[in-house]
Amino acid sequence: MSNYGYNLFMHKTSTIWHVYLPRDKIALFQWILGEYNGLAQFHTLDRFKAVVELMIPPGNEPEVARVIQALKEEWQCEINIIK
C-alpha cells in the first residue's frame, strides 16, 4: 500500500513531525533517514520552503530526535521540528 514511498497505513499510526531545514540538505537528510531502516517515512511538503514531513512509528521518536540533533551539530545549521 505504498504510493511513491508514502505509506498510508504508517501515516495513520505514526507521530507526525514537520521539519524545516536548509533547502540544500533535503536530499541528504532523506538519504540519511533512509539508511536507518524503518526509522521514519519522509515526505517533502514544500521543497522551496524546505519543509518535510516525517512519519515516525511509535517508539522511534527519541532516535529520530537524536539523529536530527547530530545533523544540526555536524552541519552547523538550523533544523526546526514542529511536533
Image: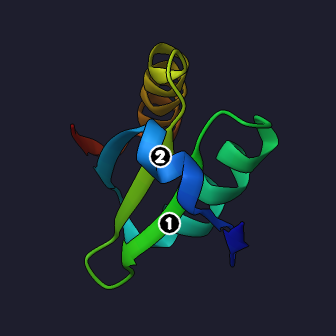
Task: Kindly report the distance in space between the C-alpha atoms of the residues bearing marks 1 and 2.
Answer: 8 Å
Quadrant where the N terminus sits is bottom right
Q: Position of residue 19 (x, y in %)?
A: 32, 51
Q: Position of residue 54 (x, y in %)?
A: 45, 49
Q: Say which element carries label 1.
A: strand
Snapshot quadrant of residue 72: top left
The disc placed on residue 55 is 2
Q: Is residue 39 above or below residue 1?
A: above
Residue at screen point 66% across, 44% down? 33
The amino acid beneath tag 1 is: His
The amino acid beneath tag 2 is: Met
The disc placed on residue 79 is none
Q: Is residue 11 left or right of residue 29?
A: left
Q: Is residue 35 above or below residue 67?
A: below
Q: Are marks 1 and 2 in contact (CB under 8 Å)?
A: yes
Residue at screen point 55% across, 27% down? 67
Q: Say which element carries label 2.
A: strand
Which of disc 2 and disc 1 is earlier in sequence? Answer: 1
Residue at screen point 31% across, 85% down? 48
The residue to which callout 1 is attached is: 43
Q: Position of residue 79 (x, y in %)?
A: 31, 45
Q: Nearer the viewer, residue 2 or 29?
A: 2
Q: Is residue 74 above or below residue 79?
A: above
